[in-house]
Image (spheres, rainbow, N blue to C red):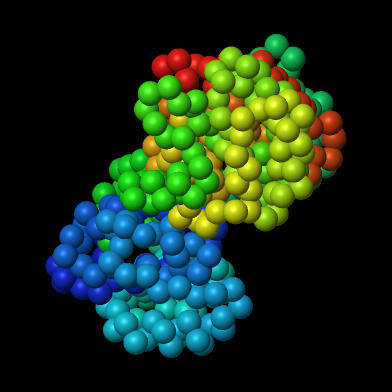
Amino acid sequence: MNPPSAIGHPPSVCRILVRGVNWLGDAVMSTPALLRLRERFPEAHITLLTPEKLRDLWLHHSAINEKISFPAGESLLSVSRKLRAGNFDLALVLPNSPRSALEVWFARIPQRIGYARPWRSCFLTRTVPPRAGAVEMHKRSVNEIKTLIAQAHPDHASRIAYPPSAHHLHQYLHLVAALGASPEPLPPRLVVTPEEIAAVAKKFGLDTASTGARPLLGLNPGAEYGPAKRWPIERFVAAAREIQQRTDCAWLIVGGKGDLALAEQVASAFHASRFTFHDLRGKTSLRELMAVLKLSRLLLTNDTGPMHVAAALGTPVVVPFGSTSLELTGPGLPGDARHRLLKLDAPCSPCFRRECPIDFRCMNGITVERVVAEVAGILNR
């Protein structure tokens, strides 16, 4: 993969603004690029502009000196005024939106680098063309899905696959390469402190003693994007039941406020089966969620933000993939053997739709037995 030609060499010490991305999973996937940027400019003061909801994700991160955050709904001009006070020499714009380019243009930052896109390139001083190997996540129409199924050969795998170089973390690495940074991938990395782990264990009564304690396993049955990303809830329950019987584990049920209804079904089933579990759905801050995921021996989860967070903290994940692509947005560094990323070779997958318009074969084909076996493989390693 050839990196873009680097701009003229900025001073060895300068003030860099990185306009961060807006979603939890994307933010985690941007950490390798931020680490490469720090490697390229070890003495620079690097400030991250981030949505308020993601601000605490970056605590203790070695790539960042300072954070500027903005709440949902804050105006473009208000954000730009904050940036103008920072006297930045250079802005690196990670999102592809017109607004993100306008923010740094109104802030009068002299050098402004980002991807070339309609309605925004004129606000950047340097536009970076799309990288070779980039794949757009195209939502398939119902007709496309039916055609793919009709044309599929029954004797070989037909699921659409992409090379490791297509992974989304390379999108951000390609941008920092325009500043002379290395485009070679690193594992996404987040930091949580021992003090934070001890505090969350005490708050929720989690037994973390190394001898004789039940293994703590995370369970995240929700996914914000839509039901097409969710392995059926009854299968989560069945898999958890089998794993509980094998390991005598304690389950840590996590999820945001939007996942409360799904997690309620899991909690009710666990109550009925007299499982040992801690219902943490909607009860943790982002930092507390990170500490819980770090405490967990593994996380059984759908493709969603906490999946990326767990992997970046070093916790193995087991993930059924359906409407989305593990090759494009899977957790961790592509090919990381610690994780178990499961898919069925359905010809219509990935379709990138919120809801399945046919029979949900991509997720229904991933069995409870297969998931249990992958969890057992991690625990027995």
Picture quadrant of residue 38 = bottom left
Instruction: Give how far across and how far down residue 18 sits, in percent.
Output: 37, 67
Instruction: Give how far across and how far down residue 335 sits, in percent.
Output: 43, 29
Q: Is 358 drawn above or below residue 376 in the view shown?
A: below
Numbered label tally: 0
For the C terminus, give its image quadrant: top left
Side (left or right) of 49 relative to 325: left
Picture quadrant of residue 353 = top right
Residue name at image x 61 percent, y 78 percent: 73
The one of 162 and 210 positioned closer to us in this rendering: 210
| Residue 364 makes an appearance in the image | yes
| Residue 10 makes an appearance in the image | no
Residue name at image x 70 percent, y 49 percent: 259
Side (left or right) of 236 relative to 374: right
Side (left or right) of 310 relative to 192: right
The one of 142 and 22 positioned closer to us in this rendering: 22
The one of 50 and 373 positioned closer to us in this rendering: 373
For the N terminus, give its image quadrant: top left
Q: Is 25 drawn above or below residue 66 in the view shown?
A: above
Instruction: Give how far across and how far down residue 204 sits, in percent.
Output: 52, 46
Picture quadrant of residue 80 = bottom left
Residue name at image x 28 percent, y 52 percent: 36
Residue name at image x 31 percent, y 57 percent: 60
Q: Is 141 drawn above or below residue 48 in the view shown?
A: above
Instruction: Give how far across and how far down residue 264 sits, in percent.
Output: 74, 43
Q: Identify the residue at the far top of this view.
A: 155
The one of 256 and 112 positioned closer to us in this rendering: 256
